[in-house]
Amino acid sequence: MDEALEKRLPKPEELNPMTKESLAAAFAGESQAAEKYMVFAEQAEEEGYPHVAKLFRAISFAETRHARNHFRVMGGIGSTADNLAAAFGGESFEVDEMYPAYHEIAKLQENHQAVRSINYALKSEVDHKGMYTAAREQVLAGKDIADQPVNVCLACGHTIIGDAPDKCPYCGATAELYRTF
Amino acid sequence: MAEPFKNTPPAAEAKGEMTAANIAAALAGESQASQKYLAFADVADAEGYPNVARLFRAVAYAESTHARNHLSVLGGIGTTTENLKAAWGGETFEITEMYPAYDAVAKLQENKSAQTSIRYALTAEKDHQGIYDSTLKGVEGKSDLAADAVRVCPVCGHTVIGDAPDECPVCGTAGSYFKEF
C-alpha cells in the first residue's frame, strides 16, 4: 500500500481482552454491513434507482475500510504465507465442523432453503481449502501460483482455477453466470 | 439480484429457531471471511504474488455469494425502502450504542490504535446515517438520488456526496486518494 495511506492507518497493538472483544464484534458488524449493502445495491438497481445503488456500493466500500482497520489493529493481517494458513484454518473449521453441524440441524427442522444455502457454501469451502493448501506450498517456496483465471459461480460460489464449466456442478448455473478474476 | 436461472437463490422461509441462529452465524462468518481475504489480497500484491492476490479476491467474492444466500434465507432482503430503513437502523445502533460503548472501554484500557479505528468508523457512520435518511425520503417519494458522485476515503471511510475535500477532515488523507463511485 501507498506510504501516504499506510501511515494514517491504525496500527496493530497489544489489546486488553475487553477491547479485543469489542473490536472483534465491530469487525463482525462492519463485515456484515458491507455484504448487506452490496445486496441492497442490486435490489436498488432492479427497482430503477441506479444512484441509490451507487450509494449502497460506496458505503459498502467505507464499511470494508472499517473492517480492514479493526482487523489490522487486532493483528489479523500477517505475511501471505501466514494469511494462507489462517485462510485454510477458517475454511477447515467450516468444512469439518460448522456447516456439517448446521446442515444436520436444518435437515432435522426441515428448513429446505437453509439446507440449500448451507450446501452451496459447504461445497465451495472444500474447493477453497484445497486451493489455499496448494497456494501456501508455492508461497513457502517463494513462488507465486500459476497465472490462470479464477472463475466463481455468482449463484453458489463454486470456485475453479481455469475456465468455467458449461454448467455449475453444484447449482446448475450456466457458464455465463461465472465471474472471472 | 437478477434471476439468471430458475434454481436461484435460496429463498426466505419460516425456520426453526436453531436454524435461524445458525444461518445468522454463518452470515457473520462468511462476511468476515470475505473481508479478511480482501485484506490478504492487498498483502499478496505488496509481496509480489499477484496470482495469489487474484485467488484471494475470487474466493472473497465466493464468500460474498454465500453471505447473500444466507441473508436471503433469513428474509433480510426487502424493497429498497425497507433496505434503506434497515441500513439506517444499523448505522444508528452503531452510533448511539455500539461504538460509544467500545470507545469508552478502549479509552479506559488505553488501547490507542483501537480508539483510532473506532473513531474512524464512528465518524463515518454518522455520514452514512444522514445520507440514508435523506435518501429514504427521496425513495419514499419514488425519486432516485441525484446523479452526483459519491466519494469515500480509503483510510477511514469518510463518505461525501459530491467532490472530495482537499484533505479528509477525519484522518487527513489527501482528497486525491478518495475512491469515486
Image (spheres, coloured by chain):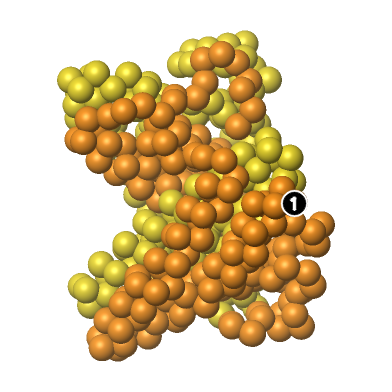
Colour of chain A in the rendered structure image = yellow
Q: Which of the 4 image quarters holds residue A153?
A: top right
Chain on which label 1 sits: B
Left or right of A74 on screen, residue B152: right
Q: Quadrant of residue A123?
A: top left
Q: Position of residue B81 (x, y in %)?
A: 58, 48
Residue at 52% x, 77% y is B123
In the rendered image, residue B51, in percent from the top left (x then y), is placed at 59, 42
Q: x%, y% of residue A120?
A: 41, 24
Instruction: Please state if A55 lies on the left or on the right of B11 as rendered.
Output: right
Who is closer to the viewer here, B127 or B27? B127
Could you tell whether A7 is left or right of A82 in the image?
right
- Using residue A92 as the reference point, say whether residue A138 is left or right of it: right
| Residue A140 in the image, given as x and y percentages of width and height | 42, 47
Quarter of the image containing the C terminus of chain A? top right
Other residues around mark 1 within 10 Å, as few (<14) / some (14–19) / many (≥20): some
Q: Is residue B107 above or below residue A9?
A: below
Q: What amino acid does circle 1 point to? A: Ser
Residue shown at the point (19%, 26%) measured from the top left: A105
Against B141, residue B162 (above or below) is below
Q: Is residue B142 above or below residue B55?
A: below
Q: How many marks?
A: 1
Q: Is residue A79 above or below residue A139?
A: below
**Which shade of the palette goes to chain B?**
orange
Q: Which residue has dot 1 on it?
A: B143
The answer, for residue A68, to whether it is visible in the render is no
Split into 4 quadrants, where in the image is the N terminus of chain A? bottom right
Residue drawn at 23 percent across, 77 percent down: A16
One can see residue A106 in this view: yes
Q: Secondary structure at mark 1?
A: loop
- Front residue of A89/A58: it is A58
At horizontal 51% and vertical 54% (from top left) the residue drawn is B85
